[in-house]
Amino acid sequence: QTGDANWETCHVTFDHGGNVPYIEGQSIGIIAPGPDKKGEQPARIRLYSIASSAVGDDQTSKTVSLCVKRVVEVDGKFMNREVGEDKPDKAGTHFPNGKVYRGVCSNHICDMTPGDDVLITGPTGAEMLLPEDPEANIIMLATGTGIAPMRSYMRLLFHDDAGANADGTRKFKGLAWLFMGVPFSKSLLYDDEHTEYKTKYPEQFRFDYAVSREDKNAAGQKMYIQTKMAEYTEDLWALMQDQKTHIYMCGLKGMEAGMAECFGEIAEKNGLVWADVSKQMKKDHRYHVEVY
């Protein structure tokens, strides 16, 4: 727990029986019973980035996993529970003394128990797919549950049998570098997996965390993703000059502004404008963004 009302994040695995084939970087839709904000039943489809690789966490190709943050706001802009109406959720959290808004779909998912049925649509999405070149470099930028597609990539690249050659070596030959931003160190997701990949493949995997409410840089600034990346500006800029390097960004809106903040100066030093650089990378299908 972090002290925030919306402290809980769940990793949830659904058994789709092989009926929802997907690939890394795609999303599925979940339909909650509702009613939703507009009173619709069932609720409108809510899209979630898939957090498992194509074969699923169990490598049977019959499951799909999501990383879902339970949305809870107390005395905020919206509310769907009056004072006294909020009941304890599966984690035991409730706020009986406030006006509470609970995200319809996220609470539906986080309150599920094994054996419950779930309505799934999809898969959908082509923006965040991995490059086919096994020698590509992948720079991953994730805030919070935006780690989901990055986890799907890393499972394939460093964990699954599907990503291994017959002799046990990995098919992936490039560098994967993850930058993850969270407010609290308790909010870090899948740290055990990142540590394992780093231990097993130190030449191919790097990860850096930006914990904004706990860490600061040398100048005393809060540690956001762009603040952490600024420590490696030269290395990252050099990587981006390689046509085999792809950038993947998933999480909160505003992340792209952070990129301009981080790389504007070095682009200028090289006689370029960051907006033009990123635009060209998008044109070359090397700059992939999914923000919400």
Image (cartoon, rainbow, N blue to C red):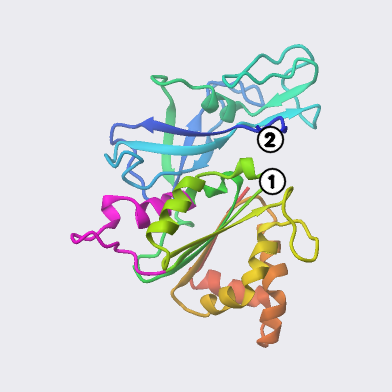
* Mark 1 surroundings: few (<14), some (14-19) or many (≥20) residues within 10 A: some
Where in the figure is residue 208, as x and y percent of width and height? 58, 59
Residue drawn at 72 percent across, 33 percent down? 4
Q: Amino acid at mark 2?
A: Thr
Residue drawn at 43 percent across, 74 percent down? 244
**Residue 249 in which image quadrant:** bottom right
Position of 247 with respect to 22 (left or right) is: right
Where in the figure is residue 63, as x and y percent of width and height? 34, 36
Q: Which residue is mark 1?
A: 183
Judge whether residue 171 is colored magenta. Answer: yes
Where in the figure is residue 241, as x and y percent of width and height? 53, 80
Where in the figure is residue 124, as x and y percent of width and height? 44, 46
Mark identifier at residue 261: none
Judge whether residue 152 is colored magenta. Answer: yes
Q: Earlier in the sequence, mark 2 or mark 1?
A: 2
Residue projecting furthest to the top = 84
Magenta range is 150-174
Residue drawn at 62 percent across, 25 percent down? 36
Residue projecting furthest to the bottom = 271
Indicate the secondary structure of the residue bearing disc 1.
loop
Q: Amino acid at mark 1?
A: Pro
Please say if 257 is above or below 278: above
Q: Which residue is mark 2?
A: 2
Please say if 43 is above or below 46: above
- Numbered disc total: 2
Residue drawn at 62 percent across, 18 percent down? 92
